[in-house]
Image (cartoon, grey):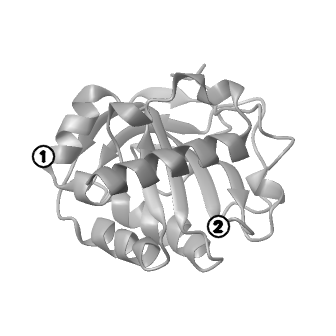
Amino acid sequence: MHTIEPFYNWRDFYIASDDDQSPFYGRLYNEFGFDHQIYNYLIHPQWDTIESSTLYLKILFVDYLEGTAIIELIGEWNDVIDNDIMLLKRQVIDKMLAHSINRFVLIGENILNFHGDIDDHYQEWYEAVADDAGWICALHFRPHVMEEMLKNNVGYYFQFNEVFNIVEWRTMRPHHLIRKIDQLVTRQIANF
């Protein structure tokens, strides 16, 4: 797992540690050692912690004028042990909501497992963005992870299914990805 780096091709557009509105503003990264781990596995030092023992993330892109954010995740999303949704919501999402971010893309191809618990924080997040015609999209989560999320009613709050597995997301610019997802979400809502 230590070789899995956060996606870095959008650094020309956004760097969270340089953004004074980011929860990770001013963060310095250890380029020579590994200081984070998931269970017994070291992870790349570029991932950011939310004080969970199993879930790490990287804010890849934020556009405050458009109200959009793209966040990549790694590890195990475990609401039972660490209440990861609460940590994510309180330490990252609430700070973004305060800056009028209301459309979130969560890239989950490096999420290995999901263990749900209560859905209060999901509902809270959903209601905060839905009031502003926003959305939360789960992109590239593994099928077994999506199944577990559906069993735990997260599908009510997140937009996700195979339609959102945009294979070419890495070759797109962040604005183009968000525009494409926005079109897909609009189509999903219209077909609902």
User: Element under label 1?
Assistant: helix
- Given residues 145 and 160, the one toward you in this image is 160
Would you call the spot at circle 1 few (<14 residues within 10 Å), some (14-19), or many (20 or more)?
few
Q: How many marks?
A: 2
With 67 as the anchor, is 65 left or right in this view? right
Q: Quadrant of the C terminus?
A: bottom left
Query: Mark 1 or mark 2, which has the lower sequence index?
Result: 2
The residue identified by callout 1 is 151
- Give coordinates of residue 40: x percent, y percent: 40, 28
**Front of the two marks 1 and 2:** 2
Asked whether disc 1 touches disc 2, contact meaning CB atoms under 8 Å apart, the reply is no
Q: Amino acid at mark 1?
A: Lys
Q: Residue at x 80, y 61 (%)?
A: 26
Q: Amino acid at mark 2?
A: Gly
Q: CA distance from mark 1 to mark 2?
A: 30 Å
Q: Residue at x 70, y 31 (%)?
A: 172
Q: Residue at x 18, y 40 (%)?
A: 148
The residue identified by callout 2 is 67
